[in-house]
Structure formats: structure tokens, C-alpha cells
Amino acid sequence: MPFSLLNFKALAPEIFLVLVASFMVLFDRAIRAKDFFFWTALLGTLVAWWLCRTSLGISFGESYTADHYGFFLKTIFLLSLFLSILISPVYARRRGFHFGEYYGLLYFAVCGMMLMASGTDLLLIYIGLELMSLSIYVLVAVDWRDPRGLEGGLKYFLLGSLASAFLILGLAIIYGRTGTLFLARIHQHLSVDPAVLAGIAFFLVALGFKVAMVPFHMWAPDAYEGAPTPVTAFMSVAAKAAGFAALGRIFLLAFASAHPMWIKLLVPFAVLTMFVGNILAVVQTNIKRMLAYSSVAHAGYILLGIAAGTREGLSAVLLYLFIYAFMNIGAFGIVTLLQREGGVGESIYDYQGLARLYPFPALLMLLFMFSLTGIPPTAGFMGKFYLFRSVVHAGHPWLAVLAVLASVIAAYPYLRIVMFMYMREPEREIQPASSLSLWAALGISALGVLVIGLYPGSLLHAVMGSVF
Amino acid sequence: MGETVLAAKYLPILILAILVFIIGLSMTIANQILAIRRPYSEKLVRYECGLPPSGEPRHPFSVKFYAIAILFVVFDVEAVFLYPWAVSFGHLGAFAYVEMIVFIALLLVAYVYAWIRGAFQWE
């Protein structure tokens, strides 16, 4: 095995992330000023993005392909990592987990996601998934004094291990039927028979679990509610994007010829996910649980783009994931801003009269809620528009109709928050946390939501060029 | 058409699965119906190597065992990896050497971390 097959340059961002993460984990005890890790992590994200941009290529035979598809998804991971790091210190200092390992684990998780996004070998995708999942299980429970975090972490761990078992089982079946693990060669050798269909179904279960597809979404509300809010923001965006990255590459590259078969499996799940997520979001009174169910519903919309099975559908998925990073992390940023000890600021009733007391945070929350609903001047509308359009173009207009109906239900939980903020009298006053980095994250998110909503042109161009 | 032929290929497995289920279930039920039952207190006691049982079997024990077990697995896997590598080192050449150095270096990071965090101290 010669060195020439190993194009280490293509792996530069992952190697960099592992080195920085190891440094932060090892030197946590030695460095007393914990802000150092915050700045290292923040700058490291920018360096990693620059490395991703300059190091496109194929490595390890055909196992690893750093193409434009991978680069766009890595941009999403690093963007959500950047924003999550910005909203972390205020929360982490208050709860006492502001240390090197926290940032190190975030880095390891992103490294796993990158392997998933660029992996063109099923085993590499599996290893990336495990690296991401194990880091996130720990991150959910990183605030170990909080029993809710431990509960959420343990539930996520137990159910997530089961999902991993499904993935490895599906991998074994596909390997048995095609004799290869490389996605492009699976595509060549795939013949549709019951065993292959079972393998495809196992992959759908395992990756559906990671993106919180109904009926494999049970972990999401508990893990999202129990996790520290910056971690919730990170996992709700980046881990979901990683799941869709693998789903897109495996289903639209390796299993492309079986599309008529798996679309029958995927569409009922997608429709169920949209409706169950949105209907259950209606009855939530905890804002983090509400956003958890809303993230389940958003997974449903995005699954439609995969189900379309076209290049246009996949590019709409990428666009939606990018936009989702801004609006969802923005919303969780506002939650972090108002959250206090003992669950104060987590109830949606704590948002009553916010506009009268603090007009600016209320205005930002209004923007994020409008974007999550999909109201025109915001990016959320653009995302939904291109997603539903791709579904119509793929020849499933009734699916788009169902998706629009689900979005109408979704308007209730989001606009109820807006109604509470602007039309109710305040019950108790919660002073927003003063943290420059948190405000920076909110500013970037709000700007992203507005700019993409008003001028989507260049982003659309980038997205169209990112589909394999 | 092709699908039905393929499904037919798996029919023996289905029949086998059903047969296994029926045989297993019927044996259990037959035992319930046919067996003669004369329970008395000595017979119903938990069996523990022939000795009188000495308390509940489920003790909570220290979570430290868990950390030790995990560390053992990590380094055990490392050792398992090293054996075939050492045996075929002759014709693998410099490439395998560098690979193993990287692998051990990464494990070393974990080892040093565990050390700093006091995972090897029992108290």
C-alpha cells in the first residue's frame, strides 16, 4: 500500500480539528484562563473552514471525496459550530462547564460530521457517525449536575446505540449483496431484491434516527430539553445536517437505481414526520421542547427534498440546511439570552410582554419565528419555496400540498410566541444576559436570515454547483 | 415478475422461521400442561451453587469499574492490533510503520488524558 494513495491534503481540515481538539482536551488542566479555549475554538473554526476551501480532492483510494458537496456541508457544520461557540460562554460559565473538554468535544463531533459528509465508503461514514454521536452523547450530559441533562444524554445514548446497530446491519447486508463498500461501486452492482431492500430500510432507520424522523424521534424532545442550550442549538442543526449529508450521498448515489422502491418507504415517513412534529409542537409549553418538535417537523420537510430524488431536490436540501442553521441557532440564542437557573425563562409564558420590556430581543425572536414559519421577507420562506418547488418538479404535487398544510399547522406554535411577546402584559421580568459573544451570534444569525431572504441569488448559485 | 421469483427464494427461510416458532412454543406449552408439579418451600428457594442463598444478587458497585473496563478494552484492542502488524511487518514496509506510529500517538493522547484526570487512581 503506497503513500501515493493517501492524499493527506484532502484530509487537512479533519487532521487540524483532531489536533486542536486533542490540545484543548489535554491542556485543560494546565491553562487556568478558560477564555483561552473559547478563543482557540473560535479561531480554529475559521482556520478549518479555510483548510476545507483549499483542500478539495480524493483520498484513501475512493474512500474519501472532498468535493463541492462535502465542502458546502462542511461550511454548514463549521457555521453552526462557530455560532454555537459564540453562544456557549455565558451559559457554560453559569453552569460551570466552561472548560477545554467542552470545546474539544464540539470539535470531535464536527470532525465526525465532516467524515460523514465526504465519506464515499460506507464504513467511513459509519465511523464518522459514531465519532459524531459519541461526542454528542457526552455533550448532552456535559452539565453533569443537572439530572435532566443526564437523563437526556442516557436516553440518547441507549437509543442511538440501537440506531448504530441498524446502520452496521444494513451495511453488512449491502456488502453481502454487492461485494463492495464504495458508494459508486454499490451503485453499479446494486440489483433490487428483498435483502437489498431490507438493507436500504435499515439505513433509513439508522440515519432517520439521527435526523429525528418520526417514528424514530422519541429521543429528540428529551435530549434537546435536557442538553445545555448551546449544545441543543449545535446538535439540532449540525447533527441533522450530517445525517442528511449521509442520507443524500448514500440514497442518491449508492441506492440511486432503487429510487422507485425506497421512495415508497420514505414518503410516508416524511409526511408523518411533518405532521407529528408540527402537531406535537402546538401543545408544548417549554420553549426548548417546542423547538425540538419543530426541528422534527423541519426534518420532515427536508426529507421531501431527498424523496424527490433529483439534483434539484438535493440542492434544495442543502439550501434549507444552510438557512436552518441561521434561524434555529438564532432562536436558541434568544432562549440562552433569557434562560436562568431552575428552568426560569424556559416556559413560553416567560415570553409574555417581552416586547414592552426589551424590544430588541423581542424583535430578533420575531424574525427567527417568522423565518421558521416561512414568512416571505425571511430566509425560511426561500428555503421552503425551493424545497417544495423541487418536489413539484419531481412530479409529486400532492406532496407539496401536504407540506404546505403542515406548515400552516406550524404557524400556530411559532406565532403564538410572537403573540405572547407583543400582545400580552409581562408577568415577570427576566433581564437578558449581557454577553458580547452571544449578541454577536444573534447579530450574525439575524443578518443571515434577512440577507438570504432578500438576496438569495448567490447562495442559490453556490448550492447548484455543490450537488454531485 | 422478478420480485415474485426472488420472494420465492426466501420462502424456505420463512417456513423455517414459522416451524421454529411453533416447535419452541409447543414445547413450552406442553411442559406447562404435562409436567407434574409438587412445589415445597425448599424447592422454590433460589439456587446458588447448592449453598443457602446469602442475600440479593444485585449489589450496586462502584462506577470506577466501568472506567477501568473501558480503558482495558482500549488498550487491549491496541495490543490485538499490534500482533498481526508485528507478524507481517516484514513485507508491509515503511507505510505500515508510519500508520502504527500515528495510531499509537492518538491512543497516547487518550492515555495521557486519562492519567491527568486521575482515572488510574482508585481513591
Image (cartoon, coloured by chain):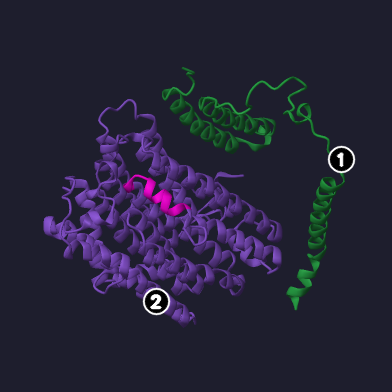
Chain colours: A purple, B green
- B109 on left or right of A281: right
Disc assigned to residue A181: none
Quadrant of the image for the N terminus of chain A?
top right
At numbered mark 1, what does the secondary structure look like: helix, strand or loop? loop
Q: Position of residue A363 (x, y in %)?
A: 17, 62
Q: Which residue is mark 2?
A: A405
- State the extent of the magenta-drawn residues as a range: A219-230
Q: Is residue A391 above or below residue A229?
A: below
Tell me if residue A224 is in the magenta stretch.
Answer: yes
Please tell me whether mark 2 sits on a helix, a strand or a loop. Answer: helix
Please say if A122 is above or below B69. below
Q: Is residue A116 visible?
A: yes
Residue for point 53% across, 52% down: A125
Residue in the image at 45% along x and 26% along y: B112
Picture coordinates of residue B5, whole percent (x, y): 78, 73
Mark seen at residue B36: 1
- A409 within the magenta span: no
Residue A75 in view (yes/no): no
